[in-house]
């Protein structure tokens, strides 16, 4: 998707037959099950299903061209007995379940809602991810990031309840690149800045206070979930590799 062009509801003439647009975008949604690198772009074009325009269709065709040029890539799931986080220059040993949470504050120019995203790893394997527009407008970047954290924690709790993974009893680590949201998970004093934050999201604090979750700060340059909330063109290939999207020549022509 182009980083310089913003999709808007009425940015060009409406398509004469929107059914083809809807069918194609619906198929792309299935594609995100094995290609998380297109999750953000597909989420964006999905927001115009009710009245697609020619510019929207051009964005869809751009996604198709990208997939055609990378048919030899796929999500790499492999066995690994060590859980070393490779996104940092030094070594960090973590629990077997870890997550990255991020948000693009007021990223949508139409309704000023933020896009939240997360990436959850089991060992070195990416097992869950999301790129989704938040349901309410956030009045601060801290609120937006905190909502994204809450969505990530809900997914972590669900994954922890699945006995098939054989997860240990250790608390998973969640990495966030917003200091305010990170401090908010454990600090109860930010009254003036957080009175407008919905009470529903404060269950994150309970998980932290009970020792069931560790929320830590990570620099924006190492935030893997960045690829689910915006189009970081200058480091797209780097983030794609961290999603375990592997280049396998033998896969060419399989999809």
Image: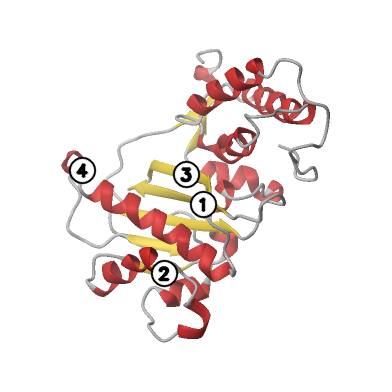
- Of the image marks 3 and 1, the number of the one nearer the N terminus: 3
Which residue in the protein does label 2 denote?
216
Give the side of residue 167 with respect to residue 138, left or right: left
**Residue at the image point whose x is 39% and y is 54% from the top:** 152
Q: Residue at x 69, y 29 (%)?
A: 51
Instruction: Choose top left, top right, bottom left or bottom right for residue 170.
Output: bottom left
- Relative vertical location of residue 67 with respect to residue 114 in this rendering, above or below: above
Marks 2, 1: nearer the viewer = 1
Counting residues from the N terminus, which is met first, the one under dot 4 or under dot 3? 3
Q: Left or right of 242: which side holds 212? A: left
Q: Residues within 10 Å of mark 1 (few under 14, many from 20)?
A: few
Query: Which one is in front in this view, the residue at disc 1 or the one at disc 4?
Result: 1
Q: Which residue is mark 4?
A: 162
State which tag comes first along the sequence, 4 or 2: 4
Question: Disc 4 vs disc 2: Cβ atoms closer than 8 Å?
Answer: no
Residue 166, how many percent across, how many down? Answer: 17, 45
Q: Name, please, the residue furthest toward the right.
A: 12
Q: Which residue is mark 1?
A: 135
193 lies above or below 97: below
* CA gap, disc 3 and disc 2: 20 Å
> Which residue position holds label 3?
130
Image quadrant containing the N terminus: top right
Residue appearing at x 36%, y 69% in the figure: 202
Residue 153 visible in image: yes
Q: How is the image coloured?
A: secondary structure
Foreground label between 3 and 2: 3
Q: Marks 1 and 2: in contact by CB < 8 Å?
A: no
Percent of width and height locating residue 213: 29, 65
How crowded pointer 4 is (Cα within 10 Å; few <14, some 14-19, many 20+) is rated as few
């Amino acid at each position: 998707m182009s980083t310089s062009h913003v999709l808007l509801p009425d940015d060009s003439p409406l398509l004469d037959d929107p059914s083809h647009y809807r069918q194609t975008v619906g198929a792309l949604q299935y594609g995100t099950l094995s290609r998380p690198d297109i999750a953000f772009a597909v989420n964006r074009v999905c927001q115009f299903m009710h009245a697609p325009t020619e510019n929207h269709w051009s964005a869809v065709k751009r996604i198709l061209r990208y997939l055609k040029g990378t048919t030899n890539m796929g999500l790499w799931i492999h066995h690994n007995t060590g859980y070393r986080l490779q996104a940092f220059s030094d070594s960090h040993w973590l629990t077997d379940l870890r997550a990255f949470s991020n948000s693009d504050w007021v990223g949508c120019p139409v309704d000023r809602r933020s896009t939240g995203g997360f990436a959850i790893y089991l060992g070195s394997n990416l097992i869950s991810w999301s790129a989704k527009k938040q349901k309410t407008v956030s009045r601060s970047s801290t609120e937006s990031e905190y909502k994204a954290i809450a969505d990530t924690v809900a997914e972590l709790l669900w994954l922890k309840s699945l006995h098939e993974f054989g997860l240990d009893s250790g608390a998973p680590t969640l990495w966030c690149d917003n200091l305010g949201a990170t401090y908010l998970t454990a600090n109860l004093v930010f009254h003036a800045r957080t009175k407008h934050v919905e009470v529903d999201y404060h269950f994150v604090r309970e998980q932290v206070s009970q020792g069931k979750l560790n929320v830590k700060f990570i620099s924006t340059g190492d935030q893997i979930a960045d690829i689910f909330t915006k189009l970081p063109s200058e480091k797209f290939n780097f983030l794609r590799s961290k999603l375990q999207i592997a280049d396998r020549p033998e896969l060419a022509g399989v999809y």
